[in-house]
Image: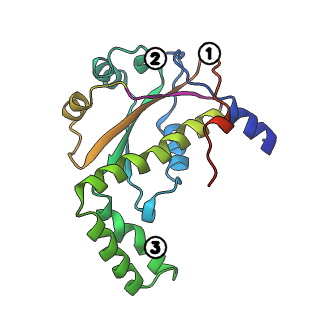
Amino acid sequence: MIATDIQEKLLTRRAVKQYDPAFKLSQDEILNLLDAANKAPSAWNLQHWKFMVVHSDEGKQKLLPIAFNQQQIVDASAVIVILGDKEANKNIDEICAPDIQKGRMTSEIKERLASQVNNVYQNEHYAYEAAVMNSTFPAMQIMNFATLRDLGSCAIGGFNRTQLIESFNIDERYVPTMLITVGKSIKTPRETDRRDVQTITEFH
């Protein structure tokens, strides 16, 4: 696929609400998509996210009322729950280990970095905001890579977070940021327009 084709696909992407319920993505295909999403940027490379994939029919039926009975929950091949990590500072040893091993970072630099990060994470408000903000980066990456693979996707913010946490036993360390449905579209999504970029941009 050449660059112009990629650009056209991404710029014409629309949210898909109607999926072919007979179309199934394998776990390997989903993991491949998430591997691409996992390359998204993050502050300090802390990778403030976790993915919970609702893939089985039973899981989707369980999720359905939590997402206010939106039909796409059960018709999509998978629903990916994006979880923001409020304790992403705890990832730093694991994340820095390859850098130290490959000579990209010294142990001394890693210790200074860890001290800086852990100090910032004493602020619970920052930890929450960082979890939400950084977890949106792989979320968009999921939708973009789904588009490049001729799959439909839709980001969903309308769901009961408290019920989701309770029903799926989500650790309090994580905040559910959004749901993303992924599957095969059966209807061309409705086109939408965007405001002129000049009206929403300021230069200083």
Tell me the residue at 20%/37% (across/down): 169
Q: What element carries label 1?
A: loop
Q: In this view, does 1 lie to the left or right of 196?
A: right
Tell me the residue at 42%/57% (across/down): 47
Q: Is mark 3 on a helix, strand or loop?
A: helix
Q: What residue type is labelled 2?
A: Asp
Q: Main secondary structure of the magenta part?
A: strand
Mark-to-mark CA distance, 1 and 2: 18 Å
Q: Of the numbered discs in the image, which one, if any, rests on residue 22?
A: none
Sequence-earlier tag: 3 or 1: 3
194 or 10, which lies in front?
Answer: 194
Q: Of the numbered discs in the image, which one, if any, rests on residue 75?
A: 2
Sequence-earlier tag: 2 or 3: 2
64 or 21, which lies in front?
Answer: 64
Q: Which amino acid does label 1 sit on?
A: Arg
User: Is residue 151 on the magenta stretch?
Assistant: yes
Q: Which of marks 1 and 2 is in front?
A: 1
Tell me the residue at 27%/46% (across/down): 174
Residue 136 drawn at (x, y percent): 45, 44
Residues drawn in magenta: 150-157
Residue 147 drawn at (x, y percent): 63, 33
Q: Mark 1 points at which residue?
A: 190
In which quarter of the view is residue 63 placed? top left
Q: Which amino acid does label 3 sit on?
A: Pro
Tell me the residue at 45%/80% (across/down): 100
124 or 178, which lies in front?
Answer: 124
Q: Image height check: is 100 above or below 167?
A: below
